[in-house]
Image (cartoon, rainbow, N blue to C red):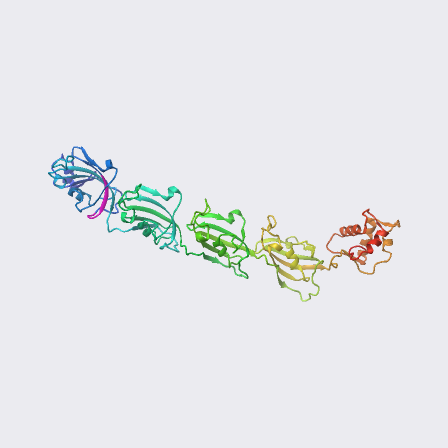
Amino acid sequence: MITCVQGMLSLSLLVTFAACNAPPVPLDDVVVETTFVPEQCARAVKVGDFVRYHYIGTFPDGKKFDSSYDRGSTYNVFVGQKQLIEGMDKALVGMCVNQRSLVKIPPQLAYGKRGYGDIIPPDSILHFDVLLLDVWNPEDGVQINTYHLPPVCSRKVEVSDFVRYHYNGTLLDGTLFDSSHTRMRTYDTYVGIGWLIAGMDQGLLGMCVGERRIITMPPSLGYGENGDGSDIPGQASLVFDVVLLDLHNPRDGITVTNQILPESCTRKTVVGDFVRYHYNGSLLDGTFFDSSYSRNRTYDTYVGQGYIIAGMDEGLIGVCVGERRTITIPPHLGYGEEGTGSKIPGSAVLVFDVHIIDFHNPSDSTEVTVTYKPEECEKQSKKGDFIKYHYNASLLDGTPIDSTYNYGKTYNIVLGANQVVPGMEDGLMDMCVGEKRHLVIPPHLAYGERGVTDEVPGSAVMVFDVEMVEMEEGLPEGYMFIWNEEVSPDLFAEMDKDKNNQVEPSEFTDYIIQQVKEGKGRLAPGFDPYRIIDNMFSNQDRNGDGIITEAEFKLKADEAASHDEL
């Protein structure tokens, strides 16, 4: 067989070149003139291979006698097994996919002296313009060429795993027949249980998420003799360029990795706790889909009670404040087969990088820890006492909120008068001057679900480090004024300075203020004294005419359980 390559010439090929360009003469052997050579030739045809090729058959004068193109299908045949004329059997050996050659076959290696009916006369030289499209061997299996491996591969595809992958599917000559990319949707399936063609079932095994590989399979492991009836012809080798995006197994539970624990962890979350946490959410291939950080707001929820996806419900149990962890959630514990629409595809594994900011339980009360107590601590705070204290306020994760030290003055309140949040009221009870306490206050005893705009987030646990600086004993419960000595029997007359048998507001106020100055009486500490006195006057002024008569005074004095009248 003589092979001619157009455009290539060396001294050793001068005789061959001359033969290729000489006028038609009787041929002794097959002449192959290669008219196109592909850049790559991964495989050349051997005897026993099965090939698919197109051809145009002509006589030396250019007259066409046959064409596979006219029939709209390739010619498919085993090479070297006498299924072809002898000259074509010889010419196909050594060809590469996408190679194009002009094959000249003498009659003794074609149809000889008999010819072929009315189509090919006896002793005809035949020319075939051949384009090889496919080659495979019955002994072939799946061929895998991995061209990208991720830096980390913690898990590989196994039989019965469920995978999500993108692919481009081509024939061996590069003809595209299908692509998940054009549909903008991954192909999602179980592996190794017969849901895929056999070659793909084998080719996906052992892949890592993020890996890219070329999977080449013979038709016996693809669509066989008949193809798919549409884009894939019968007896076609298939080539899939695959990138694996996701994998899980129906038996998978959640996995917790990359744990970073705080130095101290006095409490861990349990079912029923309310948790505030930040997260970044991504798919298994790293595709980002959501973040609480981008909203500048924690995600706040009860855990273990079905308010969030099952995998997150489970992954948030047993965490500490300040802990960071990665929670990987299979789809049956995430958003299932349907996903969420645009952001999370169906059957997607989810990865959450979580940072726990705080948590509490609705049954929590104020947690009081005494950090310093003076040796002398006989007088302790109680309801009604007027106290002055310093505090540093922060969130449970240490974020500072406020401090009286910044203002250079104490915070002053009357205990039990609802002047601070309930948890602070609890934490300041039974405290002595000089004592220091660490208070942890759950949100239902602090600033609740709403928090304080731009200062305290909703549902936040508050931490106060407090120091009692000063305390003034309050009055008995229910009293706003008390006498420190016996009450004068001529009280009304003493108030009625102008002796007109009625007490006006100014006379009443002047009298009470004078008694307090002289130590004869006490007003409740921590309140506006004039508001207390106005209130006392209103209580004595039974008919509300703005003056107190002696009759009103006596009537009020006769009433039981009267606390702030005279």
The one nearer the camera, 363 or 262, is 363
Left or right: 92 in relation to 428: left
Pinpoint residue 204: horizontal percent, then vertical percent. Answer: 34, 51
Pinpoint residue 181: horizontal percent, then vertical percent. Answer: 38, 43
Left or right: 410 in relation to 557: left
Quadrant of image for the N terminus = top left
Left or right: 87 in relation to 260: left
The quadrant holding residue 445 is bottom right
Q: Is residue 325 magenta?
A: no
Quadrant of image for the C terminus = bottom right
Q: Residue most toward the left?
A: 113
Q: Residue most toward the bottom?
A: 375
Q: Residue most toward the right?
A: 499
Q: Is residue 1 visible?
A: no
Q: Number of callouts in the render?
A: 0
User: What is the magenta range?
Assistant: 46-54
Q: Is residue 147 visible?
A: yes
Q: Is residue 52 magenta?
A: yes
As displayed, is residue 387 above or below residue 137? below
| Residue drawn at x 25%, y 39% as measured from the top left | 73
Pinpoint residue 334: horizontal percent, then vertical percent. Answer: 46, 52
As displayed, is residue 319 above or below residue 23? below
The one nearer the camera, 173 or 371, is 173
Pinpoint residue 480: horizontal percent, then vertical percent. Answer: 76, 55
The quadrant holding residue 14 is top left
The one nearer the camera, 387 or 248, is 248
Left or right: 315 in relation to 201: right
